[in-house]
Amino acid sequence: MQKALTWKELVHDVVSALPRDFMLADVLKYRDRFERHFPNNRFVDAKIRQSLQVLRDQGLLRFVRPGRYERTDVTPVFSPLLDFSVAAPFVSSAQIARVALETWASFNLYCLDCESDALDRLPNNTPVADFKCFVCERTYQLKAKDGRFGLRITGAAYQPTIDAIGRGEMPEHVFVEFDKRFNTVVFVDAIPGRFITADRVLPRKPLAATARRAGWQGCNITISGLPSVRVVAPAGIERSKVREEWKSL
Ligand SMILES: [Zn+2]
């Protein structure tokens, strides 16, 4: 007798036939097939969602945003184009830039510390880090600028940054330099988090009592002189070369 498929195997089977980028609704279209396999299960939709979560935890999928997934088993194609239209519902230009960049990053950045070709976006309120590799668990902080970065960058909240350094958990820092006029990412460089030491972190003045986040204290980080690797350049750079260079820092 043929071995019965598990939920995870069946969901993986269905997902493998979908485009690289798909929606939860695309998987739910196969409800009939799931019901045939598991006729006694009354919670088909919940089991499908749970199985997608398991596939995500195993690095086979990632969540792009709620209800939208991406398979990680297809070699990604790099794109320097920033799509500001994904951020259309947002009002402030800072928010639009952030959403467009995070979307670009979730499609184009990859783990430098292992072979994983995808980074997952962390919830927006996560202190210090923006992305995480679910294979090796390294975290990444994304910084972006229209133009070139200087010798000093604006960091996250001061105390959580100092604490992360103390625990040896400073995320890898990725610097995205883009050109808003052409909606294009120009250069991306990365600095290993372990090189960002506490003496490079300078507290900023806490926000005034009248500010929305009164008392919140950010920091500046001096990055001049730190070793880095170039991850993206206009002519394109091979991932294996970048990883090799990263290991030698
Ligand atoms: Zn990794």
Image: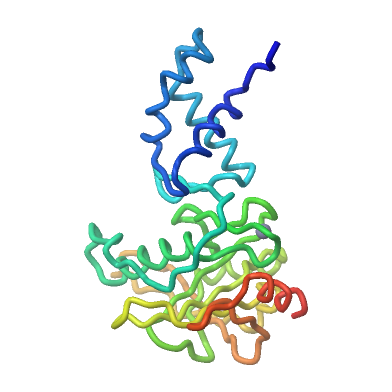
19 left or right, relative to 61: left
Q: Quadrant of the C terminus?
A: bottom right
| Image x and y of residue 37, in percent | 53, 15
134 left or right, relative to 187: right
Q: Residue at x 58, y 73 (%)?
A: 173
| Image x and y of residue 135, in percent | 67, 51
Q: Quadrant of the N terminus?
A: top right
95 vs 213, nearest the viewer: 95
In the rendered image of this protein, does residue 217 appear above or below residue 88? below
Q: Residue at x 46, y 20 (%)?
A: 33
Quarter of the rendering containing residue 103: bottom left
| Image x and y of residue 95, in percent | 31, 66
In this picture the colour scheme is rainbow
Quarter of the rendering containing residue 202: bottom right
In the rendered image of this protein, does residue 10 appear above or below residue 107? above
In the rendered image of this protein, does residue 90 appear above or below residue 161? above
Ligand 1: give its quadrant.
bottom right
| Image x and y of residue 137, in percent | 66, 55
In the rendered image of this protein, does residue 36 appear above or below residue 215? above
